[in-house]
Image: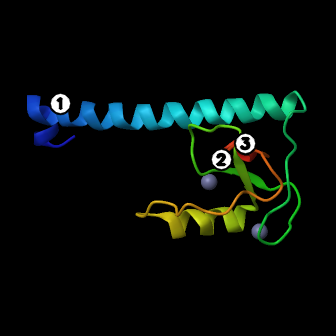
Amino acid sequence: MDAYARTPEGREAGNAAKRRWAKANYAKKKATVAVNNAIRDGRLIRGDCEVCGKPLAQGHHDDYSKPLEVRWLCPEHHAAHHRERQGSQPPPGPPVRGGYITFLHNLDER
Ligand SMILES: [Zn+2]
Ligand SMILES: [Zn+2]
């Protein structure tokens, strides 16, 4: 821990960052749980990668506020998609092929 982090200002900055992270993470978690439950209940079916067609792809959320709107991407194309998106807002893309299929970002890592 550096000296700045020990000051009241530093502590407050750290807390604010933590709150931002927690808020973003909460939405992501909630979206992930919704997808998991939907798969468990048979409301969602894990799809194939929309880029290369690899089966049992990972679910990717363009918008965590729409937890059941997922795109299926294999680990490779999922990572590539996040790299491309970094620092920019996603364009208002075409409708998701295959409908509202889902996954969670961490589903396969648990
Ligand atoms: Zn792929
Ligand atoms: Zn993703």
As helix, strand or loop, the secondary structure at mark 2 comes to loop
Q: For the point 57% across and 46% down, which residue is it?
A: 63
**Is residue 7 in view from this perspective?**
no
As helix, strand or loop, the secondary structure at mark 3 comes to helix
Q: Which residue is mark 2?
A: 105
**Amino acid found under the numbered disc labelled 3:** Leu
Image marks 3 and 2: residues in contact by CB distance under 8 Å: yes
- Please say if 102 is above or below 34: below
Q: What crowding class fits label 2: few (fewer than 14 Cα within 10 Å), some (14-19), or many (20 or more)?
A: some
Name the quadrant of the N terminus.
top left
Image marks 1 and 2: residues in contact by CB distance under 8 Å: no
Residue 50 in the image: state x and y as whole percent.
78, 65
State whether label 1 is within 8 Å of ligand 2: no
Q: For the point 26% across and 30% down, which residue is it?
A: 15
Disc 1 versus disc 2: distance between alpha carbons?
30 Å
Tell me which corner region of the image, top left, top right, bottom left or bottom right, holds residue 3.
top left
Residue 51 in the image: state x and y as whole percent.
77, 70
As helix, strand or loop, the secondary structure at mark 1 comes to helix
**Amino acid found under the numbered disc labelled 2:** His
- Please say if 29 is above or below 92: above
> Between disc 1 and disc 2, whose residue precedes?
1
Tell me which corner region of the image, top left, top right, bottom left or bottom right, holds residue 67.
top right
Ligand 1, by image quadrant, is: bottom right
Residue 107 has which mark? 3
Q: For the point 11% across and 41% down, which residue is it?
A: 4
**Amino acid found under the numbered disc labelled 1:** Glu
Residue 12 has which mark? 1
